[in-house]
Image (spheres, grey):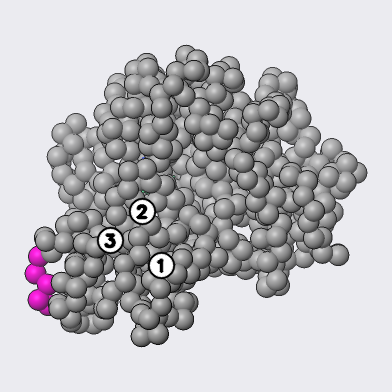
Amino acid sequence: MSNYHIKGLEEYYQVYRKSVENPELFWEEIAEENFIWRKRWDTVLEWDFEKPEVKWFEGAQLNITENCLDRHLYHRGDKTAILFEPNDPKDPAEHITYKELHKRVCKFANVLKDKGIKRGDRVCIYVPMIPELIVSMLACARIGAVHSVVFAGFSSAALRTRINDASCKMVITSDGSFRGSKTIDLKGIVDEACKETPSVDSVLVVKRIRSEVHMEDGRDHWVAPLLEKASIDCPAETMEAEDPLFILYTSGSTGMPKGMLHTTAGYMIYSSYTFKNVFQYREEDVYWCSADIGWITGHSYIAYGPLANGATSVLFEGVPNFPDWGRFWEVIDKHKVNQFFTAPTAIRALAKEDLSHVMKHDLSSLKVLGTVGEPINEEAWHWYNNNIGKKNCPIVDSYFQTENGGIMLSPIAYATPTIPTYATLPIPGIQTCLMDEEGNEIKGNQVSGRLCIKFPWPSIARTIWGDHKRYKDTYFSTFKGKYFTGDGALRNETGYYRITGRVDDVIIVSGHNLGTAPIEDAINEHPDVAESAIVGFPHDIKGNALYGYVTLKEAGKQRNPDTVRKEINQLITENIGAIAKLEKIQFTNGLPKTRSGKIMRRILRKIATGEGDNLGDISTLLNPEVVEAVKQGNQLM
Ligand code: WTA
């Protein structure tokens, strides 16, 4: 398997060079040697970042589930594919073999067909971290339906927006979900969302918490009795390389969430290649990514990437602090996990707790540690390295985005020497560059700029569902002919990259991407609110937290400020979800604006982060006088 398993830094550089000199040959060899195809491609790559349009492996036919399931049946049929660890450690773990997973996917796919789902139809999946989540995704892929997984922590309004945006024909959910010691009424949230979703014909309900739920006649169906009757025989639909595989929503700096569309062959190749290389997965390893499948990390690194490699992937339903803060370490010990992949925010929260929670468990099975989703600070990196990896496990700080489909920059475990806080080097095939604000590429090392990619990689999102113009404007218009990530980065003297954070109005809170606009829209729905602006400020555990500046109308100013704060956070919870709640709300009499009326977030951000004495020239503002008042208000927070 040439190129497929990089074993040292030297080899990394060789492979990288080849991937840049002849990207088409590079990916073609990987496609040929590592996957099964029903028909070979006619062309490897056609692309034009002006349109923008990217097509990989045109003419090829395949089904991704044959690559994730069927082809493993002979050699790995009895190997565990999904190792399900339930929320409550008192409940037994479930080892789902490749044979069993294949059977469950086929049955589920037949249920989808029976309920009228056809190739190309969109299916919304709002299911907690239980096996049916992966089963239903693969069942969609089996028959060519497009899944849109919505994180089961989003509110009914957020769910409705996403169902309607993709005109989903079906919603798959569960009666509820377990979350530590609590349960959440998912079906109730779906019912509320589906009051205004004209495209939805049916709702399939998985039983998980065994609660009483309302079942709408003709629309809602318990899935268990349907599965019981379903045949285990479901031939995989023949898909074209560029047929849509899934939509996954991510926040933008303005407006509606963006439904990033990923297609079949390129996504499969890239998620699989990066999984195998970054983590150096070996046949007998047990791998665990603790992300939620509602995010891209879960799609690529719990489901598709590991399964395409015939891996054993742990699916964890629980939370880090139930029944106590030792839960993660207990799971690693119990299942002898070899690769563990989590978010810096979880590491920071765990590092605050007593070390005895770690010491109680044997973590000697670990070989590789990973982080993803946000910058990791040095302190958290060292804590992870010393206490979890015992200085024996490389930490792969991997950087990517929903739009990218798979990891873009990361150390390759055991090949790339790591440096805390550095995502280090691009994955082969990823042609990174840094740009200045005038649109010139910044060459050389020891420089910083805006991170762009010059050349397509197989799993780049092909469009924003229903809004190709926005896709072009957001990613391809800032720097001509380049994909712009929206992140800033620096490149050190050896060419290693460190991601320095978003340069737009997206804020990463606990690793979740939050756009300011939808949150401000939710706040502005409050009858007492005149205007609002959200910025991020540093937070020990979450990385960033949200700081809201809110100007109230006269009537609102007479009310108890804490009551209004609660109401504002309630509105955010209803419209988006609890993850977007504001940590601090400062009431203002006005917000600094440019002469064209645009709120100057740069100034507000500085005030929120305690740099209010360093604002530079503010004399060109429309209303420079409000700045002093905002600064004084901040002192009181
Ligand atoms: C941020 C998550 C620093 C970045 C997989 C990016 C990171 C956004 C890292 C995408 C990292 C992700 N270091 N920042 N290792 N990984 N980010 O779409 O700002 O939920 O643009 O995908 O997370 O978030 P998304």
Q: Is 64 drawn above or below residue 168 in the view shown?
A: above
Residue 39 picture quarter: top right
Position of residue 121 measured from the top left corner of the image (x, y, whole percent): 70, 59
Mark 3–mark 2 distance (CA, rounded to whole Å): 14 Å
Q: Is 285 drawn above or below residue 560 in the view shown?
A: above
Name the N-terminal-most of marks 1 and 3.
Answer: 1
Disc 3 marks a residue whose amino acid type is: Met
Disc 2 marks a residue whose amino acid type is: Ala
Q: Give the crowd class for mark 1: few <14, some 14-19, many >=20 residues within 10 Å.
A: few
Q: Looking at the image, which residue is at 67% across and 54% down?
A: 186
Q: Give the range drawn in magenta.
A: 616-620
Q: Give the crowd class for mark 3: few <14, some 14-19, many >=20 residues within 10 Å.
A: few
Residue 208: mark: none
Mark 1–mark 2 distance (CA, rounded to whole Å): 19 Å
On screen, residue 201 versus residue 149, left or right, reads right
Can you tell which of label 3 and label 2 is closer to the viewer?
A: 3
Name the N-terminal-most of marks 1 and 2.
Answer: 2
Q: Nearer the viewer, residue 494 or 420?
A: 420
- Residue at numbered disc 2: 545
- Residue at numbered disc 1: 562
- Residue at numbered disc 3: 637
Name the N-terminal-most of marks 3 and 2.
Answer: 2
Mark 1–mark 3 distance (CA, rounded to whole Å): 13 Å
